[in-house]
Amino acid sequence: MPQPIVIAHHLIWTAYGWWLPNDPRGSTSREIRVEKLKDLGPVHYERKPVQPSREELQRFHEEAQDRLAHQVIEFTDEEIELVGKSLGKVIGEEKYTCYRCAIMPEHVHMLMRRHRDKAEVMIEKFQRETREALIQAKRRGLLHPVWGGPGWKVFLDSREAIENVDKYVQENPKNAGRPEQHWSFVTKYDGWVARTRTKQAKLASERET
């Protein structure tokens, strides 16, 4: 059985303070390192099968904000534009292909074609460039964290998976009551899929003969 080949990545990361280790939605953390946050609730690794209500999540964030070292800030519309411009700069410089992007007041979704850079490296470059841009624009102070951690990624290995994420990211702003986003650095997904390992092996064999 040939192993599936990663075609694209769904990259997600949040602004500082918006997704804590014991977030009621679940998280990518396995422990709580900040003592003040421990009694907010237990850690649940990965997304919970039953998600909290909007009201429950809001109560959690309101209580957590008083315990964090820095203020929790949402991105304004102007800051969202600045973040988008910075993401576009990285995409152009690194020759990435972005199929869809949604920059929300408290998190970012990006659907990225597979690249020589690993998903973690892409997120790191995006976060570094956007943080520097916000600081230079005097939208954040030098000591205030912009992002809430390294984020996480979902590997996509089929056209169907990419199209599902594409639709999800596209509808993310609308579902939050915000206008649909259109970014100049986004390339519409054209149905590209990588060859399977079986096909690659067959082609290699034909070349040898």
Image (spheres, grey):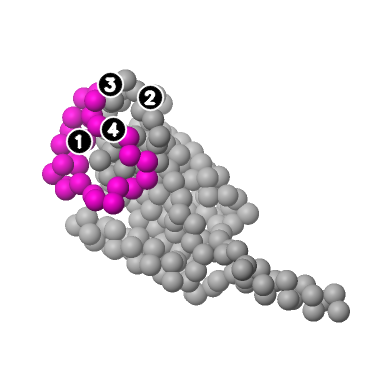
Q: Which residue is mark 3?
A: 36
Give the residue type that dot 4 points to: Pro
Dot 3 falls on a residue whose secondary structure is helix
Q: Which residue is mark 1?
A: 60
Give the residue type that dot 2 points to: Arg
- Horizontal side of 39 relative to 136 (left or right) equals left
Dot 1 falls on a residue whose secondary structure is helix
- At horizontal 25% and vertical 32% (from top left) the residue drawn is 41
Of mark 4 and mark 3, the one earlier in the sequence is 3
Looking at the rendering, the stretch of residues picked out in magenta corresponds to: 39-67
Residue 39, image x, y percentages: 24, 25
Q: How far, Cα to Cα, is label 2 from label 4?
A: 12 Å
- At horizontal 62% and vertical 72% (from top left) the residue drawn is 195
Quadrant in which the C terminus is drawn: bottom right
Q: Is residue 163 magenta?
A: no
Name the residue at the top extreme.
35
**Disc 4 crowd, CA 10 A, few/some/many (<14, 14-19, 20+):** some
- At horizontal 28% and vertical 25% (from top left) the residue drawn is 38
Q: Is residue 65 magenta?
A: yes
Of mark 3 and mark 1, the one earlier in the sequence is 3
Q: Which residue is mark 2?
A: 33
Give the residue type that dot 3 points to: Lys
Relative to the observer, which residue lies in front, 59 or 3?
3
- Horizontal side of 48 relative to 95 (left or right) equals left
Of mark 2 and mark 4, the one earlier in the sequence is 2
- Horizontal side of 116 relative to 156 (left or right) equals right
Residue 204, image x, y percentages: 77, 72
Of circles 4 and 1, the one toward us is: 4
Of mark 4 and mark 1, the one earlier in the sequence is 4
Res 80 visible = no
Displayed quadrant of residue 16:
top left
